[in-house]
Amino acid sequence: MEGAKGELKHVVVVKFKKGIPPHEIEQHIKDYANLINLIPSMKSFHWGRDVGVCGMDEGYTHIFECTFESQQDVVEYMAHPSHREFADLFIPKLDKFLIIDYKPTLVHP
């Protein structure tokens, strides 16, 4: 096994509050995705909805994953005015959320 050289994943798992219209959720997702165009330290962005295969989602519905080259890049991302503006609008729409930052480990057979 080997760790990715400096690469860091920033994962946000959320459950939107009841009553948030689908078009508003879609706009928040678009705004989140657009951060990659505004914040240089953000190297990639992926998102998806829980598909319920395991039935262990604990109510979380969406997952967002950003890739950075270092922990310092995540710190810069969190402090960036575009991220702060987005978070100020996004977080109040959430019933709950979880954030995990990790360094991926590659497993060789």
Image (tube, rainbow, N blue to C red):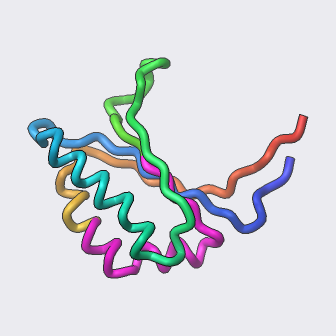
Asked which quadrant contains residue 50, the reply is: top left
Q: Main secondary structure of the magenta part?
A: helix
Quadrant including the C terminus:
top right
Asked which quadrant contains residue 32, the reply is: bottom left
> Is residue 77 inside the magenta stretch?
yes
Give coordinates of residue 5: x percent, y percent: 77, 65
Count of marks, rendered view = 0
Query: Is 28 drawn above or below residue 107 in the view shown?
Result: below
Give coordinates of residue 13: x percent, y percent: 40, 45
Left of 72 or right of it: where is 29? left
Residue at image location 37% in from the left, 29% down from the top: 58
Give coordinates of residue 74: x percent, y percent: 52, 71
Residue at image location 29% in from the left, 40% down from the top: 15
> Is residue 43 inside the magenta stretch?
no
Residue at image location 58% in from the left, 57% down from the top: 9
Asked which quadrant contains residue 68, the reply is: bottom right
Residue at image location 28% in from the left, 45% down from the top: 96
The range drawn in magenta is 64-86
Left of 91 or right of it: where is 70? right
Kindly give the residue lying farthest to the right in the view shown: 109
Give coordinates of residue 61: x percent, y percent: 33, 35
Query: Is 2 drawn above or below residue 53 in the view shown?
Result: below
